[in-house]
Image (cartoon, grey):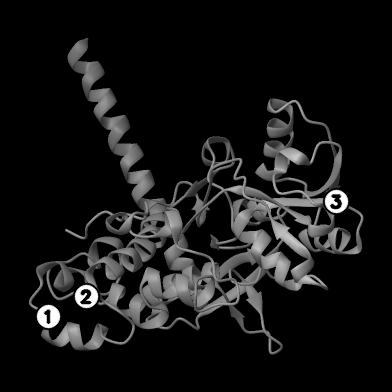
Amino acid sequence: MVHRNWKTAALGAAMIVTSVAGASAATLDDVKAKGFVQCGVNAAGLQGFASPDDKGEWSGFDVDICRAVAAAVFADPTKVKFTPLTAKERFTALQSGEIDLLARNSTWTMSRDTQLGIVFTGVNYYDGQGFMAKKSLGVSSAKELSGASICVQSGTTTELNLADWFRANNLQFNPVVFEKQEEADAAYDSGRCDAYTTDASGLYSIRLKLANPDEHVVLPEIISKEPLGPAVRQGDDQWALIVKWALFAMVNAEELGVTQANVDELKASSANPEVKRLLGLDGDFGKSIGLAPEWAANVIKAVGNYGESFERNVGQGSPLKIARGLNDLWSKGGIQYAPPIR
C-alpha cells in the first residue's frame, strides 16, 4: 500500500511538473509571436517613473524595466507597448492578460502576492508612504495634521496605511478619496485638501507638477514599507524568471562596474569571471530561461545598470533629485542586492 501510494504521488508530482513546464513558456511565446512586450504603467504619468513626452514616447524608472525585458527577449528595447492603468485597473489588466508585465509603482504585499493570481518578481524601488502639505499650514511633522483633510487615492495600500497610522497615533483626519491619481493631484493643488499622502517618491514627482511647487513641503515621516516592483501572472515560471533576472542583471551590473558605456569593451576584454557570466561569455545562463547568451548585455546596453537608471530618472541627474538611500547597493549602505549569476 505504501509503495503504491508513493508511485501515485510520484506520478502526480510528475504531472504537476509537466503542467507547469508546459505553461511556463506561454507568455514568452505570445510575446515573441506578437513582436513586443505589453507593459502596464501609471496612467497619470508619474514623472521620473513613467510618463510620456509630447510625442507619446514613454520614459522613467518603471519604463526602464519594461524596456529591459524587451531588450532581454528581442535585443531591442523599443519592442514594447505601454498600457496606462489606474490603481484600480492595474491588477485586473494583468490577471486578464491585457498586459504581459505590470511595472506601475505597485507595492508588494502578502495579499497581492497570494490572492490575486499574480507574483512580484523583485523590488526596483524601496519606498515608504509620506505626506506633503502646504507650507502655509505651518506644520513640520505629520503628527501636526490632526483634523486635516488629506487627499488619497482609493484602491491602494496608501489608503489603508493612512487610516492605520492616524488611528495608532490617536489623531483625527478627514480623508478626501479619489479613484484616479490625477484627480487627487488636481484636488490638492486647488486647495480641497490640506495635505496629500502617497509613496514618498510619488510626492516628489507630484510636487513638480503643482502650480507653485515651492509652496509645498514633503514632511519627514515615513509611515510604511512600500517595496515597489514589477509583477507578472502566476503559473508562468519562465516569464517570471525573465522579468526577475532582467532587474537582477541591472543590479549586478552596477556592482560589477558594467555600464551602458563600457559593456561592449568589457565583453571583449574582461577577465573577471563574474563579468563574463553576466555578459554571456561563460555558461548557459541565458539558455536556461529561453534567452540568447548575451541577454544581460543587451539589457545593460538598452537602459544601463541599476544605478544609471536610478540617477537618470529619479536621482541627481533628474528634476526629482531623490537620494539613493535604501536603494543604494548593499555594499554602499543601501539594501539593493541581487543574487549572483552563477
Instruction: Give above or below for 257 relative to 186.
Output: below
Residue under pointer 3: 194
Q: Is residue 288 left or right of residue 310?
A: left
Residue at 45% in and 47% down? 235
Q: Secondary structure under badge 3? A: loop
Residue at 35% in and 38% down? 16
* Cα distance in 3D space between marks 3 and 1: 56 Å
Q: Secondary structure under badge 2? A: loop
Closer to us: 204 or 50: 204
For the residue marked with disc 2, what is the amino acid? Leu
Residue under pointer 1: 270
Tell me the quarter of the picture where residue 105 sits. bottom right
Q: Is residue 70 left or right of residue 255?
A: right
Q: Secondary structure under badge 1? A: loop
Instruction: Give above or below for 230 relative to 149.
Output: below
For the residue marked with disc 1, what is the amino acid? Ser
Discs 3/2, front: 3
Marks 2,1: beta carbons within 8 A? yes
Q: Position of residue 155 (x, y in %)?
A: 73, 45
* Cα distance in 3D space between marks 2 and 1: 10 Å
Residue under pointer 2: 279
For the residue marked with disc 3, what is the amino acid? Asp
